Amino acid sequence: MYSTDYVDAGTPRMAPGRSVTLTIDGLPVTVPEGTSIMRAASSLGRQIPKLCATDSLKAFGSCRLCLVEIEGRRGYPASCTTLVADGLDVRTESARLMQLRRGVMELYLSDHPLDCVSCPANGHCELQDTADALDITETRYGLNGQNHQAAAVDASNPYFTFDPTMCIVCSRCVRACDEVQGTFALTIQGRGFDSTVAASQNQPFLASECVSCGACVEACPTVALTEKSLIALGQPDRAVTTTCAYCGVGCSFKAELRGDEL
């Protein structure tokens, strides 16, 4: 999970180049060519609902929450994978879009109960925030159908846990392991309803090729991959920017604290 004060634009920033001007919700915006509609909307302060998209990874388009309407085009394209073009007229909010997004969120919640009060990520969970934004507190599909709630927690790694009952299979952890760390330790195993995140050859994280870099934990939008310190200490109440003293490079990073405890 990202820092508590971080605003995620959804897809990576494009290098400056030819500019493209379009209209989003009646407002003109000019961005570099190759920018996603999602990121262009974010630059206007409009946060389109998303779960699989994050600005540290390439667009993926699997969660189907970021649908938009484009004047003159059929269907409801995903804003994370749809690029801007001159003259586009985009709507990010409508009754139909709300209906579609709520339907998708209800499907997620049919296998992910909103037991948020007892959850260590309460108040800092993208799934919880998105459900709140869509005014979803329960699912019409109920919680008694086929689900993954009996899956065992993997607490083998000394730094974090993997709870598959909280996983929505957005693939952000797999992509972070690939694109950010380059370790390729994670994969999606199985197909359809049987899809699940697996470390190496379906091994416990500690026995796998995982190097405990934390990229997957940072990318996870739920509490499926969570630092053990967060479970033990609770949510941080502030973030401060500091400098890593490990080597002479002096990289800047944000440290989160609860009171005076790191």
Image: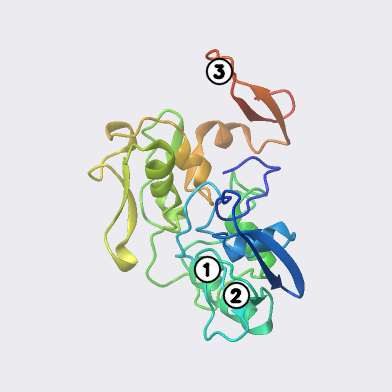
Q: Is residue 137 left or right of residue 141?
A: right
Q: Nearer the viewer, mark 2 or mark 1?
A: 1
Tag 2–tag 1 contact (CB < 8 Å) = yes
Front-lying residue, 79 or 101: 79
Q: Residue 80: which quarter of the image?
A: bottom right
Where residue 23 sits in the image (x, y, percent)?
71, 72
Checking the image for residue 132, the label placed there is: none
- Disc 3 secondary structure class: loop
Reading the chain from its start, which is encountered first: label 2 or label 1? 2
Residue matched to label 1:
82
Q: Amino acid at mark 3?
A: Val
Q: Residue 99 location in percent, x, y?
A: 61, 81
Q: Please identify the quadrant where the N terminus is shown.
A: top right
Left or right of residue 12, residue 87 in this image: right
Q: Residues within 10 Å of mark 3 (few under 14, many from 20)?
A: few
Residue 162 image point, x, y percent: 42, 43
Residue 47 appears anywhere in the view: no
Q: Classify 10 Å Cα crowding around label 2: few (below 14), some (14-19), many (20 and above).
A: many
Q: Which residue is mark 2?
A: 68
Q: Residue at x 41, y 49 (%)?
A: 175
Q: Residue furthest front?
A: 18
Label 1: element kind: loop
Secondary structure beneath dot 2 equals loop
Q: Earlier in the sequence, mark 2 or mark 3?
A: 2
Q: Amino acid at mark 2?
A: Val
- Residue identifier under label 3: 249
Disc 3 versus disc 1: distance between alpha carbons?
A: 37 Å
